[in-house]
Image (tube, helix red, strand yellow):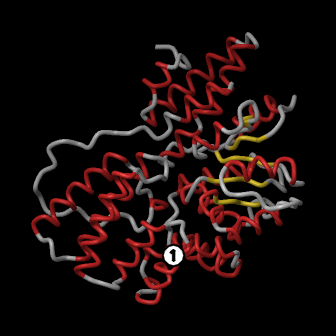
Amino acid sequence: MDRVIILLAALLFPVLCLPQGIPETVAPPPPPANALQGGWDRQLNQANAAQWQLANTHAPGDAAAQWNWFQSAYLASNSRNNGTLPQQDRQALISIADNIRTLAPNSFEHHMAEYYLQFPAPSAFDQLEAAYRLAPGRAELLSPMLTKALMEGDRPAMVTWSRELAQSGKVAPGLARAAQDLFFCLPPQAVVFTNGEMDMQPALVRQLQYQDKPGVLLVDRRLLTHPPYRARVWQLAGATGPVPGAGPAFAAALLSAGTRPVYFALGMERSWLEHFPGQLHAVGAAFRVGMASPQDATELSNNWHAMHKPMDAGPLSRNYLLPGAMLLEQARAAGQQARARQLEQELRRMASATGALSQLQQLGIITR
């Protein structure tokens, strides 16, 4: 079972090659203000980044165009690398940010570029505040300001910014349905660790604006580098003893020191998954972390049938292949041939819709 989890986790965010032959045409439209609007198409992001690079080559003195290039390149790197920035991509973004600083020092675009480069360090939120003071109505602020409110534990601000996201329509419908699936699979007092904006913020909107599972504690694993945030999560989780450091060791300590069940969103960082061999149990749109339970298989089967399983949630749609593959493996092991055939057909449709069919065939999960 662990092998299925880790192998499939490596397939959720594959690296795609930059499309060749980008035409020298008019610059593309600006990128989405945030990925919650649907700015997750890897090839489109890379094509846009290449076109904005070309546009800036022809007109290098436009800070707004440089900012569009930065956003497109940042989205492209994130969609390739599951929310992380490899050093090579970071250096390219630093170069663009340097251009923006030279063209428009202390501008909104300059501060926002620095926010993304410095995140999640405390200095990133200083840059965000500076950008907010300059242009509080800019759409690019909605997602970062919600993250800032979460980091600071400022519930009124969390309610405000989640309402802004909900009312402005900047959470793609597929992400909203994926957030509903996440809550459906969690007990009322669960602690669930998320990987970033795409799984955390739609869940915050659902919880704060629509009262989905208000007792669930949502944790952004990236913010655990902040000691005050880490201490607040530790306290809210009902944990006792010294507050541990950041990273998967924090969740491991919470298993024994806390009073609430611990879960991971399906898109969790692969290093986190590898830290818990034999302790990850798919229950639908989340992993329950800890000892195996006789109810795990039944819970997964029941939740699988009840979930939306949206195929328009960008990379989050691929996450559903993980519990689906586990359910298929269970059906085959139990000799449930009719059930296995039905599940394989469903997985085949989902894998085709998300571009993962060949990978699942290579792993032997789906027959050729």
Callout 1, which amino acid?
Ser
Q: Of all residues shown, which one is farthest toward the bottom? A: 133
Query: How far across and how far down the image is residue 249, in percent?
Result: 72, 49
Query: How far across and how far down the image is residue 365, in percent?
Result: 56, 19
The image quarter in which residue 229 lies:
bottom right
Query: How far across and how far down the image is residue 254, in percent?
Result: 81, 52
| Image: 280 above or below 332 | below
Task: Please identify the quadrant where the N terminus is shown.
Answer: top right
Q: Of residues 159 and 168, which is closer to you in this image?
A: 159
The image quarter in which residue 134 lies:
bottom left
Disc tally is: 1
Q: Of residues 47 and 110, which is closer to you in this image?
A: 110
Residue at x 46% of width, y 89% of height: 133
Residue at x 64% of width, y 53% of height: 194
Residue 321 horizontal side relative to residue 214, left or right: left
Residue 22 horizontal side relative to residue 173, left or right: left
Query: How far across and how far down the image is residue 318, in percent?
Result: 52, 39
Q: Residues within 10 Å of mark 1 (few under 14, many from 20)?
A: few
| Image: 126 above or below 265 | below
Circle 1 is placed at which residue position? Answer: 123
Residue 307 horizontal side relative to residue 260, left or right: left
